Image (cartoon, rainbow, N blue to C red):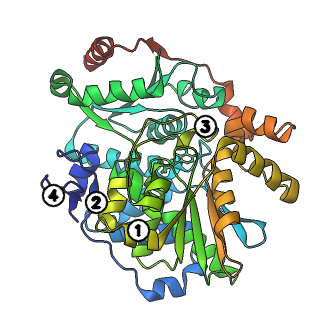
Amino acid sequence: MKYYSTNKQAPEASLQEAVVKGLAPDKGLYMPEKIKQLPQSFFDNIEDMSFQEIAYVVADAFFGEDIEADTLKKIVYDTLNFDVPLVHVDKNIYSLELFHGPTLAFKDVGARFMARLLGYFIKKQGQKDVKVLVATSGDTGSAVANGFLGVEGIHVYVLYPKGKVSAIQECQFTTLGQNITSLEIDGTFDDCQALVKSAFMDDDLNKALNLTSANSINVARFLPQAFYYFYAYAQLKKQGKANKVVVCVPSGNFGNLTAGLIAKRMGLPIEHFIAANNANDVFFEYLETGEYNPRPSVQTLANAMDVGDPSNFARILDLYNHSHEAITNEIEGYTYRDEAIQNIVKYTYDRTGYILDPHGACGYAALEDGLRTDETGVFLETAHPTKFLDTVESILSRKVEIPAKLQAFMKGEKKSIELPVDFSAFKNFLLKEAN
Ligand SMILES: *Cc1c(COP(=O)(O)O)cnc(C)c1O
């Protein structure tokens, strides 16, 4: 299958080129040229299939032409070695818990899939020295570092802002060792991202090193997120609740929601989607007004959604031929400030005993506000609440137990290399790594 750029100014790419390059040369995002409709027989029996079986059918529709069946199946099954349970929270509202992977956030799915696919292509090309650069405000670094841990031929550099990620998140990428190096940058997340961008544009670095990126721009990270929408539907169907399904996605860069829109295009019977925003609500504004005005992000309690210019907006526009009407027919929007997030975490816990994380809280709140009584609502619970321990404990005024899997990270020894916000220092560091 070929991949085209959303800017339509670059040649079509093979899957391998799209995955290795990440961004198209015209700075557009790659999109699959075909979105295959899955047969009715698949949906008829979906409730009897396992998550891995369902995901393989979906993966085959995108990647089957380019990867041998055995290899693709192994990549899918290895990626999804954990469950994504659908948990009833209240009334007609369910939580799709995407936090049962190794780093307890949904990004594990895309990062693990991408690591395996890139590892496969690199081996095929006989490359041994690919360097993945990733800037993180928390969750991306841990999912990417853990996804790529031990993958041959790839070294990962995680750039993170010193003192600005939670202690638990920091442990998740600084204690791994092996092919993972953490760079503690004396600046903000934006500074980290700017260093990574400058590195990709630097001729000397590109001559000396095979650089690539692992953010949600990459098709290998973004498309696999479609898998769990099908599995959520299967779990609802098993309970006879799959008649009028509405899915709500707490959104930042909008990769997760876009994967859901693609699942619907493949025939998944979802009535419509709800995009939940925090105070960074340029997408919400777009839905309301038809105008898109990106602006610098502000810090909120749901920090993984603090994005002022979501990169996957370009994919949503492309999917609907830039029609505001078509977009608002399928996507509704809601937005919540920090105070509302705090209230919903507290209120939901008091009513139901369910502990939301600040991102899932936006999703839950939007279903409370937007769902009709004859519909069934699913919100994506994108991270385990203890990844935001201080916030959640202070809202609930109680201790919350940290899962053993998360505690295990905290026992490791932190190793990082401190760098200033200075491109020439970063460049010299990378050039030394080349030798
Ligand atoms: C990354 C992230 C999001 C936002 O997902 P997008 O695909 O960028 O919209 C939401 N919640 C959590 C916990 C995340 O880590």
Q: Secondary structure at mark 4?
A: loop
For badge 4, the amino acid type reads: Glu
Badge 3 residue CB within 8 Å of ligand 1? no
Q: Secondary structure at mark 1?
A: helix
Mark before the other along the chain sequence, 1 or 2: 2
- Separation of marks 4 and 3 at Cα, in angstroms: 38 Å
Q: Secondary structure at mark 3?
A: loop
- Separation of marks 4 and 1 at Cα, in angstroms: 25 Å
**Contact, mark 4 vs mark 1 (Cβ under 8 Å):** no
Tell me where residue 209 sits by quadrant.
top left
Q: Provide residue 344's location: percent of width, then percent of height.
A: 75, 51
Q: Secondary structure at mark 2?
A: strand
Q: Which residue does the numbered mark 4 point to in the structure image? A: 12
Mark before the other along the chain sequence, 4 or 1: 4
Q: Residue at x 45, y 48 (%)?
A: 253
Sort mark 4 into few (<14), some (14-19) or many (20+) by Cα contacts within 10 Å. some
**Contact, mark 4 vs mark 3 (Cβ under 8 Å):** no
Q: Provide residue 45's location: percent of width, then percent of height.
A: 55, 85
Query: Which dot, 3 or 2, sits closer to the camera?
Result: 3
- Separation of marks 3 and 1 at Cα, in angstroms: 27 Å
Mark before the other along the chain sequence, 3 or 1: 3
Mark before the other along the chain sequence, 4 or 3: 4
Sort mark 2 into few (<14), some (14-19) or many (20+) by Cα contacts within 10 Å. many
Q: Which residue does the numbered mark 2 point to in the structure image? A: 31
Tell me where residue 296 sits by quadrant.
top left
Q: Residue at x 64, y 74 (%)?
A: 235
Q: Nearer the viewer, residue 395 or 171?
A: 395
Q: Which residue does the numbered mark 3 point to in the structure image? A: 300
Q: Residue at x 41, y 85 (%)?
A: 39
